[in-house]
Image (cartoon, coloured by chain):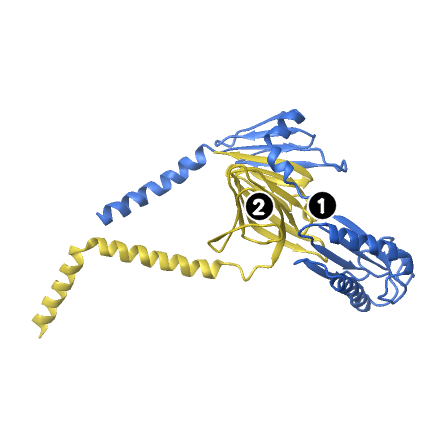
Amino acid sequence: MLEGFTVGLIKLHRSLSWKESNYMKLWISMSFAVCLALAFIVAPLPAAEIGQIKNTAGQVFLLRNNAQQPAKPGDLVEAADVIVTGANSSVGVTLIDNSRLSAGPNSRVEFKQFRFNPTTQEGESLTQLHRGTLAIVSGQIAKRSPDAMKVQTPTTILGVRGTKFAVKVEE
Amino acid sequence: MHLLKHRAALVLAPALLVSGCASVNTYVVLLPEEGGAPAAVMVGAGNQSALLDKPYSAAAVDAKSRIETKTVSAEDANRIFADALAAQPPPAISFILYFETNSIEVAAASRPTLDELFAAVAKRQAVEVQVTGHTDRVGSLADNDRLSLQRAEAVRAMLIKRGINSNFLRAVGRGEREPLVPTPDEQPEPRNRRVEVIVR
């Protein structure tokens, strides 16, 4: 009885050792599952719209919750959305604090954080330009509180005191 | 085989991330604003920072967080950012509609402005409308919060009735908190009994 159990254990161990890659697969899928679970916990509650796409030219995509869809004028932008443009493409966006952002070709813009209270006019925003070009006219957030509007690139953080400026990130 | 692939991927991934960042450069230019409003952008990189506060002052930042500031020509800035600048949406326009005391009816004198508002809303593509109601300082804070919201909602309802095609049409009330003309409490002031409409 006990012997049988031990042999069984050894067999189990062997069968596992022989397929070490399966451990790795298991480990990877488990880590993936944990990451996925964490992503759901960390993910913000259903986001409200923070702005709108006003114009598009060429190939423009809106990335939300890992899903990608072609962007068109009138599409709502939510916090955490990413807008991507292709070659010879551009997009214009207005946000609810009246700021205006427009990206040129081969750009990737992420609306990392955005909070704006229309009643108090107070808020803060963090937009990241991963690559490409971005022209910005700041709105109420920067007007109300200098540096509350921030723009990030892979190497810099910009504190916006107003109003019109442009950023380029080249790889 | 699988194991090798995974290990190789795990080792390579961080290397790619690092090398990906290492070649990135950021270039920032402050542009003149149409209204001539004072403008400035603080550029921070690592422990360093530089303030851009003159039109066409620019900063170039390399992967080692070195900031180099200079002034660029309008032609250069407009060429580098030509596509992005061409895609800038037009600025928002705002309208002010006035109201009689304790009323949610737009005052007769504001009827023409109301028509201008309807026209502007009809003309814009992917239009967004933000309606904000205000009151003067007659009455309690709470009553004025309620009245200002009712004024805003009345304007919103008129836009909906006119068949506005918008997926962003929001009405809020700010009560007596943001007078156009500051007054002592309980003083009637027609210029503060208003609804401001921002059309994007």
Amino acid found under the numbered disc labelled 1 = Lys
Is residue B189 at all visible to an observer of this figure? no
Disc 1 chain ID: A
Q: Is residue B132 left or right of residue A136?
A: right
Per the model, the C-alpha gap separating discs 2 and 1 is: 17 Å
Give the chain letter for yellow.
A
- Residue A127 is marked as 2
Whether residue B111 is visible: yes
Amino acid at the residue labelled 2 = Thr
Left or right of A19 in this view: A165: right
- The chain ID associated with circle 2 is A
Give the residue drawn at x 68%, y 38%: A164
Q: Is the residue B135 above or below the residue B11 in the image?
A: below
- In the visual, does A95 lie left or right of A16? right
Residue B94 pos. (x, y %) = 78, 50
Q: Is residue B57 above or below residue B145?
A: above
Residue B81 x/y as whole percent: 60, 33
Q: Quadrant of residue A19?
A: bottom left
Which mark is on residue A143? 1
For residue A19, above or below residue A133? below
Chain B on-screen colour: blue
Residue in the image at 12% along x and 63% along y: A11
